[in-house]
Amino acid sequence: MRLSRYFLPVLKETPGDAQVVSHQLMLRAGMIRQTAAGIYAWLPLGLRVLKKIENIVREEQDRAGAIEVLMPTIQSAELWKQSGRYEAYGPEMLRITDRHDREMLFSPTAEELFTTIFQNGARSYRDLPKNIYQIQWKFRDEVRPRFGVLRGREFLMKDAYSFDADFAGAQHSYNRMFIAYMRTFARMGLHAIPMRADTGPIGGDLSHEFIVLAPTGESDVFYHRNWEQGHDTSAIDADDAGALEAFIDGLNADYAATDEKRDATAEAAAGDALKQSRGIEVGQVFYFGDKYTKAMGVTVAGPDGVPVTPLMGSYGIGVSRLVGAIIEASHDKDGIIWPDAVAPYKVALINLRADDAACAAAADGIYARLEAAGIEVLYDDRDERGGAKFATADLIGLPWQLVIGPKGVAAGTVELKRRGGDREELQIDTALARLA
RNA sequence: CGGGGCGUAGCUCAGCCCGGUAGAGCGCUGCCUUCGGGAGGCAGAGGCCGGAGGUUCGAAUCCUCUCGCCCCGACCA
C-alpha cells in the first residue's frame, strides 16, 4: 500500500481525552476514532490489526475443535426471560424496542442463544461433546467506559460454549480451551498468565482469567516467577485428556492470582519467587455446569435412553481489547512496537527523498518487488521530509523499516531497521531476502 | 451510580474571574528556499465560542436549564 493513497490520519499531538498509552497511541496512529463514550470507529490500520488478532483466535479455536458460528447482535428478550437473566442483568444490558413494541436487546453475551441453538441440533449423547463459538460484537452499557478499547461499551469478543455429557468430559473441554488460550496469546507475542478466578455459585476450581502483564494494567496481580518463562505447548496432544490435565495441573502448581483472589499461604510458600505486577484481563475460561441447560430445559438422550442435561462451559477472549493490551505491553516513547504476528504491515518502506528521481525509482522498484513477494508493505511515498516519515513509521510501529536514501542508492544499499532494535546497511537483495 | 472537571479552528490550548469587533502553536492550501530523525520564509483558508433560554445597549465571558465528553470511586470481557 502506498501511503499517499492510504487513509492514515496520524496525530502529532496527543488528544486530551486519552489517558492510557494504548488509547493515546491508537488515536495518534490513526487506528481508531471515538464516536461516543466507549464506542469506536476502526480505521484501516486499526482494522488490519483487529483482523490479524481475530484470525489467530479463530485458528486456535478451530485447532482446538471448536466450531464457528455467527449469532445476531440483536436478540429477542424472550430467551433471556427463560433463563431469568432479562431481569437479573440490569442496566448494563442495552434494551431496545422495535416498531411493534417488542422487547429486544443488544447481546452482551450469548449463553442463552447458544444453548437454544445447540438444542436445535443435538438430540443424543452421541452428539456430544460440542464446542461452538463466534467472534461477534457485544455491547455492555458500562457505567464508566474508559481506557479506549480496553474498556469500551461495544467490543469484539470471541465467545465459545462447550457442551458435555458428564463432568469428566466438561473438564476436558475446559482444558482444551485452556491450552488453546495459552497458544493464542503466545502467538500474539503476549505473555498471558492464567489466574484463578471466581467461579460463582457453581464452585470448584474451573475458572481462570488470562492476564497480560503490563505496567499500566488495571489490576494488581501476584505470581510465581516461573510464570515469567514462556511455556512450550507445542508437544501437548489436546486429544489426550490425561496428558492435557497433567500438563495444566503442572502449570497451575505455580501460584498466580489477581488482587481479589490472593492466597496468603500460597504466597508464603512462594517466598522470594513471588512477583507482583499489574495486568489486563484478555480472556476467561469458565465452567458452569447445567446452569443454562437446566434453566432452558435442554436435554439429550443418554446411552440408556434417559434424558441427560448437558454440562456447559463458556470461554471468552476480548479481541478488540487485545489490540490495546498488546500496545500496553509493547511500545516505547516513539510509538507502538507491533509483535510480528499482529502487525498491520510487516515493513515500512521509506523513501527519504521523494524529490530525488534516482531515489524514487529505487524505492518504487523495491516496493514492486516486495508486493510481488507477497510481503505486507506500507510504502511511504509522500512528499515529506525524512524526519516526518521516520516519526510516522515509529508511531505506527511496523516491525521493519526499509530506508531508501540517496547515499545508499548510489552505493546499491539500503538500510534495514528493526523497530525498537538495530539498523543495518545491506545490499538490496540481502535486505529483501531478510524480509522474505 | 456518588464525587470532581471540561466543551472556543482539524489537533493541543489561551481568552472567561473583571461583559465591549475571537487568538496562539501545530496541522491544512499556494509559492520560494531546504531535504538522513516531525525544517524556514512569505501569503492564505478555516470558528453562529456544545445547545436552549435569561440578564444587559452589548454575552465566549454573568445566571438557569440541557446535551456531550473526561477523571476519581464503586462495578466490569
Image: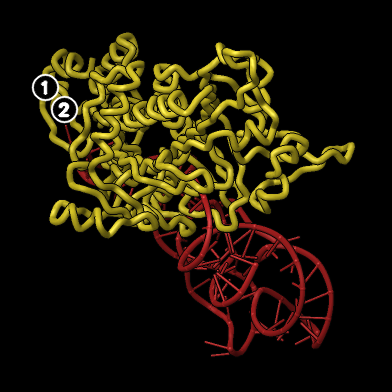
- Name the tint of chain A in the rendering: yellow
Which badge, 1 or 2, comes first in the chain's sequence? 2
Identify the residue at image location x=24%, y=29%: A400
Badge 2: chain ID: A
Left or right of A366: which side holds A6? right
Q: Amino acid at mark 2?
A: Glu
Identify the residue at image location x=31%, y=24%: A244
- Image quadrant of residue A173? top left
Left or right of A131: which side holds A28? left
Left or right of A37: which side holds A17? left
Instruction: Answer whether residue A317 is visible to the viewer in this image.
Output: yes
Q: Residue furthest right?
A: A100
Badge 1: chain ID: A
Residue A218 placed where, x, y %?
39, 55
- Image quadrant of residue A105? top right
Q: Quadrant of the N terminus of chain A?
A: top left
Q: Nearer the viewer, residue A418 or A93?
A: A93
Q: Nearer the viewer, residue A239 or A193?
A: A239
Q: Secondary structure at mark 2?
A: strand
**Mark 2 Cα-neighbour bin, 10 Å: few <14, some 14–19, many ≥20:** some
Residue hosting label 1: A426
Q: Which numbered dot is residue A4?
A: none
Labelled pair 1, 2 in contact (Cβ < 8 Å)? yes
Chain letter tied to red: B
Q: CA distance from mark 1 to mark 2?
A: 6 Å
Q: Nearer the viewer, residue A215 or A228?
A: A228
Instruction: Answer whether residue A29 is visible to the viewer in this image.
Output: no
Above or below, A371 against A154 in this view is: above
Residue hosting label 2: A415
**Mark 1 Cα-neighbour bin, 10 Å: few <14, some 14–19, many ≥20:** some
Residue A388 placed where, x, y %?
31, 41
